[in-house]
Amino acid sequence: MKLLKKSINLFFASSILFAGSVTAQGNPAQMRSVNFSKVQISDKFWSPRIQTVTSVTIPVCIEQTEVITPRIRNFEKVARKQGEKHEGIYYDDSDVYKALEAIAYSLKNHPDAKLEAKADEWIDKIAAAQLPDGYLNTYYTLTGLDKRWTDMEKHEDYNAGHLIEAAVAYYNTTGKRKLLDVAIRVADNIDSTFRLANRNWVSGHEEIELALVKLYKATGKQKYLDLADWYLQQRGHGYGKGAIWTNKEMGEKYCQDDVPVKDQTQIEGHAVRAMYLYTGAADVGAAKHDPGYLKSMRTVWEDVVFRNMYITGGIGSSGSNEGFSTDYDLPNKNAYCETCASVGMVLWNERMNLLTGNAQYVDVLEKSLYNGALDGLSLSGDTFFYGNPLASDEDNQRSKWFGTACCPSNIARLVESLGNYIYASSDQAIWVNLFVSSSTSIPLKKATVQIRQESNYPWEGVIRLTVDPSSKIAFPLHIRIPGWANNEPAPGSTYQFTDRVDSTVSLSLNGKPVKYTLKDGYAIVNGQWKKGDVVTLTLPMPVRMVKATDSIKMNRNKIALQRGPLMYCVERFGKDQEQSFVIPEQVAFNTSFDKELLNGVVVLKAEVPFLMPADNGKSIKTEQGTLTAIPYYSWANRGHSQMDVWLPTRISSIDVKASKDDK
Amino acid sequence: MKLLKKSINLFFASSILFAGSVTAQGNPAQMRSVNFSKVQISDKFWSPRIQTVTSVTIPVCIEQTEVITPRIRNFEKVARKQGEKHEGIYYDDSDVYKALEAIAYSLKNHPDAKLEAKADEWIDKIAAAQLPDGYLNTYYTLTGLDKRWTDMEKHEDYNAGHLIEAAVAYYNTTGKRKLLDVAIRVADNIDSTFRLANRNWVSGHEEIELALVKLYKATGKQKYLDLADWYLQQRGHGYGKGAIWTNKEMGEKYCQDDVPVKDQTQIEGHAVRAMYLYTGAADVGAAKHDPGYLKSMRTVWEDVVFRNMYITGGIGSSGSNEGFSTDYDLPNKNAYCETCASVGMVLWNERMNLLTGNAQYVDVLEKSLYNGALDGLSLSGDTFFYGNPLASDEDNQRSKWFGTACCPSNIARLVESLGNYIYASSDQAIWVNLFVSSSTSIPLKKATVQIRQESNYPWEGVIRLTVDPSSKIAFPLHIRIPGWANNEPAPGSTYQFTDRVDSTVSLSLNGKPVKYTLKDGYAIVNGQWKKGDVVTLTLPMPVRMVKATDSIKMNRNKIALQRGPLMYCVERFGKDQEQSFVIPEQVAFNTSFDKELLNGVVVLKAEVPFLMPADNGKSIKTEQGTLTAIPYYSWANRGHSQMDVWLPTRISSIDVKASKDDK
């Protein structure tokens, strides 16, 4: 098992200074992400998507939350105090908060007085539902306060966590404190109920840990960081024994409560809970300079990425526990790959990147973002996948909403806050992590550095970075060189390209090759920067075939198609594509941008043998035809169809279908 | 749509007197089933199965109920009154009662002092958990009695119904009244809480209706029949509005509460609930001579059997609501077909037969019994199917137990009480419904008639009936002529044999052709019976190919194999069978009894073309090979394998599998 990201091999090797691998103690550079509010995105790929979330997805979330389902009504009922019944599920409050968080980001991207008034109206209703002692939870307030904090699975602190995240986001966008003050009282109430009272408690669904770190950063109050750390430290000591999840097949593993967080080495249980836990652990580890969390999170990350991650960056293969089964058990059709888990992968990998300074985490972040997460949202923005399988028998379609509706607002808040993941900086340096056309302004030493990024990524690999310092300044500019650009479709040996190609990554400054260091997945250009300097990165964008490690039995005799960060898939539309096919060993895919198709995508085409029934319906003939592959994120936007990410290169057996409706 | 069973066409037509179709008012003959306790079974097919249930399945149910799961412990906790927590689900009490009912039947078949002592021990624990007012429910007694009878979905009367059934069964076997007295107090408590208090209430999961009719028959007390009728009449008036099930997609339909029972025309919602409702409605209709129930149950039955029943007699195609979707939506791989629903089909069709005197109901009963229900139990008796699909991708195996464990004890009590379904009688006549080697003694007029039945059914079609009256007596002996023996695989036109064959049904008395009438699916021999008379029925047992109506899209271009009452399926064991195949139009299946295979089964074999990968794995070749089919009930007893009941006659498309673990 290859544990560390390989050093990259460039054409002009003379310019490279190998700087060794990740340090054991994390990144001494103290990277901070550049907040999305400081980043103006003007990207052909992402800008229309952000606009769709603003104009379609968020209104859908509002209508579902307020009109179609009783989520807002529960808050109103609490305020009315007329003994009305709670409707829905005990974690429904969190959907209100996640929608508010998405609205907060959207208001930053696209100020909108009417939308802000709606948010204020919700916030008034939320505030009116808070009890004098700070407790805020419509389920227990309406069904019996005597039972509050008696069942660790009932998501009370999960709801509180999403409230805090929404409050911090809304405060950051609008400067309005009302929801933040509500959140502070909620956090204080929890703090006095548990940590300060020495009462043990394991949160059944992690989320509050990362939220409390945000509250700590927003308020500067150490106690919220301490409470986050306290939540982490409660796990793995048996305090959760007897909680509802111990009745389940997996016991404490289901909620990552069988082992203390710092001793955890393997991902287990419910995938979204795991992601939020790891994100919180990385946050607390960074804020408290605690190497124990970093150490365990590194080990767990390897377990996730090397043995339990789909090629789409999705995780959580098992629907029965919404989580993990055994290493390399990655079925395609039955893949669960919850949208929220891919959102969680983005969050966690961002933290791991900031904590270590290593770009391998951004490689995974990018993979999850462009594939596993983005797939959760339809192109039209109004329907959603809860699970994101890698193969389908025509039976998967996005839904308008879900009983458990965690995913829609989660993908909405992710897309609206995409700007968070593009740039990072420290007191000494700047990092470019994602290739999204955008500009930002970063204070550095005594100057301010404007960075403007232009590209047609992910369709094309040329990225133009204009560096505009307010005054001449020397600093290292770190530009991520994606693993896939150097023959590594995913960190580790889980997935490999079928052939190695000479890398054509190139980097120039003002049109001339530039000297740089390669370290931890970044090309580091140590320049004396002046106004108008242009760095051009050219990433190779050939169509690559990926093979999975033999341990993933489901993918034996199959390949997947990758181009840039995008995974591709085959839907069965069109005459030829209705039939089965086999990918020959030697096959050339050509690429073309089809602006009419699926809001504009690069399609991959190749001539391959198709297998189809002979005219008498009794035997199978082979005929050459054209196979078309589309980006994975864009499937299921044209109606029902069979879909496959992993494509057969060899037939081991066949299933005969006697009719179209054979099922 | 053919609504009435076709009259049967025999060779010796001269002997036939056509008696017309079913009467609108039901059966004036007042058939009663002969209780299983009066029937001694000595059958090569069934006796070993009953023995397995006694020696394996019932001990498994006891161990699961008492040791592995907390079902019995909940009763103990109630009795201890120490504020202990309820464990498990609110309907778990019912599993204790169903196991007790199975034990009661088993004790009749195989007296066993140790087992009876265990039952008495359980009964003591149950009795100790009854409250002074008669209420008995461990869930509410342990979680808060203030909430009892507030949620119609919480199965309080479902549990009570199974308690009553167990109590009546145990009393009938042992004569011990303790549990019966408990049940009487439970029923009286319910009666005073609702019917006598004029309080409306809809039972969320029907079951108590049929149970109360049993209590009425055991005690002779009219009020229990009235309460059963009251329960039926509560449905369909909106009294269930606001109950938990109105939150579900289907609203009141889910629990058959959208329309009054007598106005129901279609099956809908949850299959098991529907079956128990219909059984109860037929029971009350019979006991109260109320034609309203018969009328609606006839119409609903046609909807079930003509448009919503699998060829296995299974029902309830949809896993999401454990019930029904749209007419003819009968997917094979995704078939839910809960074992309990097939048990329910046996119960309901027995009642419909007794109510109408028509054998078409026994045709369906026999189909559900030998196929959909029996499939729920492994040959070893210690593992169970909850759902019984008609096709499988190797991923279905019987389980040792279930969280919701309704099926194991349900199939156990059905097999132990098989004797109930073999014979029926009235004051004037005797009916033979099932062909199971057995003997019984039926009081008729002033005589007692011994009937002895011998056959090797379902493997062979010769049934020998010895009639031994205590004195010479004239009475009509009704012998069921199965629909399948005359070209009708299921009532209605849902399923048809691909070719009609001349029927070779023959009936002889003491070796000579006998004159008889054919009416409502019965051959009626009006004899002057004397000791030692032997009636021999010979049913044709060719292998028949069945086609489904074109409306069942999933079965287009497919056939199923049937022989006698048994449906067959193909598992993919053996060299040839690992591959796909196509059934040619003209194909001859030969039959042979393999005593080593699956506890002894008749297998069907034919030479057919198999489709398999060419050696290079890139194309498909056709090779002739031997296809082997086994009885459907016996699949999944040799390990994991693909399985299909419906076999392709034509290829519409193929799915390529690249590896064995492709999924």
Image: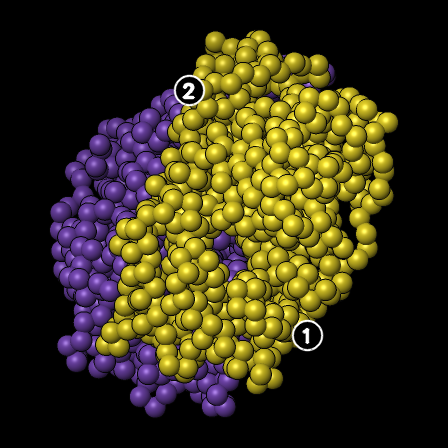
Chain colours: A yellow, B purple
Amino acid carrying label 1: it is His
For the N terminus of chain A, the quadrant is top right
- Residue A314 falls in image quadrant: top right
Q: Residue at x 82, y 45 (%)?
A: A21
- Whole-percent x, y for residue B200 in the image: 18, 71
Q: In this rendered view, identify the residue nearer to me: B440 or A391.
A: A391
Q: Amino acid at mark 2?
A: Glu
* Residue B655 visible to an observer of this rendering: no
Residue bearing mark 1: A237
In the rendering, at what x and y percent does residue B181 appear? 35, 83
Please give the label number shown on residue A596.
2
Horizontal placement of A635 versus B212: left or right? right
Task: Return the x and y of residue A454 as percentages of the image width and height.
Answer: 56, 29
Q: Residue A443, can we see it?
A: yes
B213 relative position to B560: left or right: left
x and y, in percent, of residue A29 in the image: 74, 52
The residue drawn where x is 21% and y is 37% is: B3
In which chain is the residue bearing label 1? A
Disc 2/disc 1 C-alpha distance (Å): 57 Å
For image coordinates 48% across by 78% down, the residue present is A189
